[in-house]
Amino acid sequence: MLVVVAGSHGVGKTTILKRCAGYKEMKSVVVGDLMLEEAEKIGFRGGKDKIRRMKPEQQVKLREAVFRRISRLRGNYIIDTHFVVGSEGRYVQGLPYSVIRLLKNVGGLICIDAPTKEIIGRQVSDKSRKREIEEEMFVDAERTMNMSVSSYLSWYLDVPMYFIENRNGRLEESVRTFKNAVSALING
């Protein structure tokens, strides 16, 4: 079973997933890492934070290659990805129909979110990456799109959707909520 976990960059997805490593024997796959692997095969250099600036048609090819790989996974996996990928006011679907149709065993969706100012603060303070820092209106727009896309995908795939608010200073609460959601998805 695949559990798709998504949210805006800087919302804390990877931080939560690291805290839940091995929970219920779930393995994690970071779509951005696989995208970078695929991009490097065709000569791309610049790190995964620069992939969002590639031409849309290049992103589509990379995404489809990555999700073909993911579709062949067996066992329980958490897929760390984005419902929407934004860059300077331009947005593309992180999970368009062309890749969703490849995934036959999605058991549920988890959308992780946080208040806009907290997301921007995390983007600014994260020195481990070269993140693009978005203006408030763009982060707000992306958050709204994430909720819309996750709601649609939940309906389309006929799977449950969980929403987790990852507030500053409440990481343990977010981790506990995430584990409860995963347990519910695994146990049906």
Image: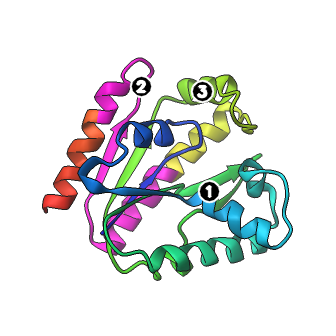
For residue 102, above or below residue 114: below
Is residue 173 shown left or right of residue 129?
left
- Magenta range is 146-175
Quickly name the residue at label 3: 122
Quickly name the residue at label 1: 32
Identified at 55% across, 72% down, the residue is 96
Is residue 108 shown left or right of residue 19?
left
Closer mark to the observer between disc 1 and disc 3: 1
In x, y percent, where is residue 188? 13, 63
Disc 2 to disc 1, C-alpha distance: 23 Å
Question: What amino acid is at disc 2?
Answer: Arg
Disc 1 to disc 3, C-alpha distance: 18 Å
State which quadrant residue 152 falls in. bottom left
Disc 3 to disc 2, C-alpha distance: 11 Å
- Which secondary structure lies at badge 2? loop
Question: What amino acid is at disc 3?
Answer: Arg
Q: Mark number for residue 167?
A: 2
Identified at 20% across, 43% down, the residue is 180
Is residue 137 shown left or right of residue 22?
right
Mark 2, other Cα within 10 Å: few <14 / some 14–19 / many ≥20? some
Q: Decide whether residue 166 is among the magenta residues.
A: yes
In x, y percent, where is residue 93? 60, 64
Q: Decide whether residue 170 is among the magenta residues.
A: yes
For residue 37, above or below residue 172: below
For residue 164, above or below residue 184: above
Number of marks present in the image shown? 3
Mark 1, other Cα within 10 Å: few <14 / some 14–19 / many ≥20? some
